[in-house]
Amino acid sequence: MLQRLFMDTVWAKGFMAVCGIGILIRLITVFSYRGMRKAAENPSKTKKRWVVGLRKRYENYEKFDRMGNVEVFVDKFFERKGIMGIPLRVWDKAVLQLAIVSFLLGTAGAFYSYLMNFGTARIVTTLFSGVMGGGMLLLFHNMGGTEDMKAQIITSLKDYLANGPAHRVTQEQLREKTAEKRKEPLPTREEVEGL
């Protein structure tokens, strides 16, 4: 009965497709966050393009005195970060939305089975399959700890930018100022006595 249900109905194929896509999306998100966390642990030595871009942009803002708040800068930059061109907030919410679709597919399949008078067993099995698929996606969404990883990435980048490149930029500016002062000629004895 269950095998026939999964092979014959569109609803069951929809469950399998939604669950497969949800699992795939979650795996991509978890592995991407792990790579980002590894890159953010030591931003000065990483060669990841997004971290190097963040560092360069921060240094440019510091040079032109446009940096107001490091936390806002990192949050704004991280919001724009994406996986395969899709923003992170979309990846984070996709599994939840697919779980809702699975619940709706189960309900729609059970309602269709009721309208076609397929019997109580098929109605309950279809509804139960949708609920189980959605529940599995919700459980899978809570596994992996991406919220903790995201917080670690943001904290690491904030700490690095607050303590790292800003000091280098100010030291470079001090060196430039002292070099400019050295280029100016020293006043002569007559100029000093005239003051």
Image (spheres, grey):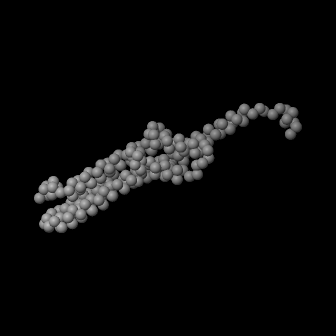
> Position of 154 compared to 192: left or right?
left
The one nearer the camera, 123 or 31, is: 123
The one nearer the camera, 152 or 122, is: 122
In the rendered image, residue 159, in percent from the top left (x then y), is placed at 51, 48
In the rendered image, residue 192, in percent from the top left (x then y), is placed at 84, 36
- Image: 148 above or below 55: below
- The answer to whether any part of residue 168 appears in the image is yes
Q: Residue at x 34, y 54 (%)?
A: 94
Answer with the quarter of the image where residue 1 lies.
bottom left
> Position of 75 compared to 143: left or right?
right
In the rendered image, residue 38, in percent from the top left (x then y), is placed at 41, 43
Residue at the limit of the structure toward the front, as seen here: 116
> Position of 128 compared to 1: left or right?
right
> Position of 54 compared to 88: left or right?
right
Answer with the quarter of the image where residue 180 lies.
top right
Q: Residue at x 16, y 65 (%)?
A: 116
